[in-house]
Image (tube, rainbow, N blue to C red):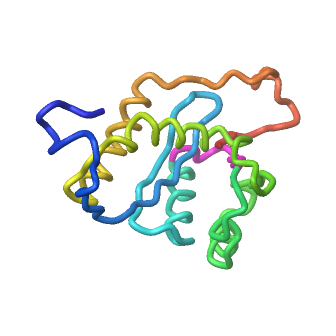
Amino acid sequence: MPVERHYSTIARDYEYKRHGTLSLLAGIDLISGRITYKVFEQHKSWEFIQFLKELELIYPEEKIKIIMDNHKIHTSKETQEYLKTVPDKFEFIFTPKHASWLNIIESFFSKMTRSLLRGIRVDSIKELGERISQYIDQINEKPVIFKWKYKIEERDEMPGRIMI
């Protein structure tokens, strides 16, 4: 969150100089509400694999189901090779094209854009990454569990951890 006198300014103007972009890979644990994330400078298969490895460390004993879009890094040769090293650890469920609203993490990204990113001005790409991390870490202090119409505890046919 913006802190008065801590950052050079909160609003951007026509003189604002962009320092670059970052890639945010994130998933919401539907049981705990916790957001697992990694911030990278690029958005390639290697970064996606690093995110999957992070999920493996967090949920070592559980199968992880991930609902996501059809981005090419999710199905790349590199990703497929990595998935062969951890058989039955991940199950990918792809949303239809042009249907981002079906994925809860996309709603989180939208909220973060409106409440954090839209009005900030940063002095470096490093500061941008720090601000994103600070925002998500604050949300994880009191995670919110998404309420489905069916009870997630009664998911007999869906064993494993579900990430979105």
The quarter of the picture where the N terminus appears is top left
The residue range painted magenta reads 58-67
Q: Position of residue 146 (x, y in %)?
A: 64, 25
Q: Is residue 123 left or right of residue 30?
A: left
Q: Is residue 64 left or right of residue 38?
A: right
Q: Is residue 66 magenta?
A: yes
Q: Is residue 100 above or below residue 18?
A: above
User: Residue lying farthest right?
Assistant: 157
Q: Position of residue 115 (x, y in %)?
A: 42, 34
The quarter of the picture where the C terminus appears is top right
Residue 152 found in image quarter: top right
User: Which residue appears at 34% of the width and 65% of the height?
Assistant: 20
Q: Position of residue 112 (x, y in %)?
A: 46, 39
Q: Position of residue 148 (x, y in %)?
A: 74, 24
Q: Nearer the viewer, residue 55 or 138?
A: 138
User: Which residue appears at 28% of the width and 55% of the height?
Assistant: 14
User: Which residue appears at 54% of the width and 23% of the height?
Assistant: 144
